[in-house]
Image: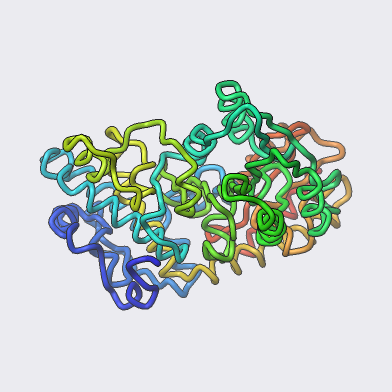
Amino acid sequence: MANWTRRDFLAGSGVAAGALALGAACTSNGSGTSTADDGNSNGGGSGDDDRPDFDARDWASVREQFSLDTELRQYAAFLLAGHPRMVADAIDGYRSALDRDPQKALGDAGTLEGNARDLAGTYLDADPKDIALTDSTTAGLGLVYGGMRLSSRLDVITTVHDHYATHEALRLASDRDGFQVRRIALYEDPAQATLDGMVGRIVDAVIPATRVVALTWVHSSTGVRLPIKSICGAIAEINAGRSEDGRILVCLDGAHGLGVENRTIDEIGVDFLIAGTHKWLFGPRGTGIVWGKPEAWARLRPSVPSFAPVAIEAWANGTTPAAQWPGQLATPGGYHSFEHRWALGEAFKFHLMIGRDRVADRTRVQAAALKEALAQIEGVKVLTPMDEKLSSGIVAVQLIRRDPFEMIELLRTHNIVASLGPHNPRTLRFGPSIVTTPEEGEELVESIAALA
């Protein structure tokens, strides 16, 4: 389990002790790293001490933590999110420390990365040692699928609904190692998708050579949320009749689930969870995580040398690094955008302060209202299931009479920011979240009705 509990955090436990030296340096430049510990995010990154205190129970106060254009209705934050103030202040503070004395700041890199892992572990109720830090969902998918020990005799199942990054990561690995990749459809009409139907199609596709099922938690173009715990349960039943070497791993692209779904890692149930943290989590741009079970990590071969102290020490001593730190050993080494990676913990703090359950409820209530209202508009077909067990934050629609590219531009004239799904045919997507309000949802519906 993680080193911190939610109760410890809310009591003001603060950052890891080893980070205090750099944290203090950041505080003098307004970083949220130290000042956020008392429940406020008014660290004064710009020297502004007149900011109102952050009330995590007040949604208006939550919205005030962002520097988003208040004239715009932000329904595409899930594509690339803005930073809340405590994340932005932490980035600024770490950047200032790096600019003043790079070598001194770099000396705290291990502690600060550990702090980010600890908070990710607290958020997911997971062991931080099992978490690798990456730059994005795409980088994490490449790390996992590119590292799989799969021979040409073996088989991977994915779906036609998965993102380009999953398909391409699997293609590149398959081209190198020769294993088979099969794409299956889990539904024809996303609005009519069912739990039993999706689980059944995955189970039916499994063959003796299958070793990986590569899935996406929430489908980008339709908003369908997989019943992932049920899928994992069905795969577990298959695995019960297999040897350890023949066991199927379930790997999940969690880009549109992390930061919006109220689930611990055990409640998700997968072997690997891969996600960027700059979408629904509103974390630093260019950050992400991979969580894996220890036995799942053991089936991967890292492709980029780690800069973990245990790895470098083992190299210096001519030995192999200890396997009890799989997340660190799988984290690609080299120099990164340190100030962003070190500030990642602040994004997890921000969500823990608000409450993971409250974030999920706030998003789901708005998404449900939006789906119901859009379904009443002529010329609009809602693709996302109405069933909240099979949907999340993304609301996707098809337009009968309008080109979706044209609609994106028209909505901009109404100060509404929307997004297009990546698959063909292109869909129009909206992402209600903690930076939108029910009232803005009503404005969005009125604009769609007028334009569709």
Tell which of 307 and 28 is nearer to you. Answer: 307
Q: Does residue 31 appear to the left or right of 295 in the view shown?
A: left
**Image position of 208 with respect to 356: above or below:** above
In the image, what residue occupies the spot 57% across and 50% down? 244
Tell which of 211 and 79 is nearer to you. Answer: 211
Q: Position of residue 27 (x, y in %)?
A: 18, 57
Q: What kind of colouring is applied to the model shown?
A: rainbow
Is residue 442 in view from this perspective? no
Tell which of 34 and 71 is nearer to you. Answer: 34
Q: Position of residue 401 (x, y in %)?
A: 86, 37
In the image, what residue occupies the spot 60% across and 69% down? 361
Q: Quadrant of the N terminus?
A: bottom left
Q: Position of residue 181 (x, y in %)?
A: 68, 31
Q: Quadrant of the C terminus?
A: top right
Is residue 349 in view from this perspective? yes
Tell which of 199 and 119 is nearer to you. Answer: 199
Give the total of numbered labels: 0
- Occupied quadrant, residue 228: bottom right
In the image, what residue occupies the spot 11% across and 44% down? 104
Q: Does residue 113 appear to the left or right of 288 in the view shown?
A: left
- Occupied quadrant, residue 5: bottom left
Q: Position of residue 61 (x, y in %)?
A: 44, 67
Q: Does residue 131 appear to the left or right of 28 in the view shown?
A: right
In the image, what residue occupies the spot 60% across and 26% down? 174
Extreme residue toward the top, this view: 175
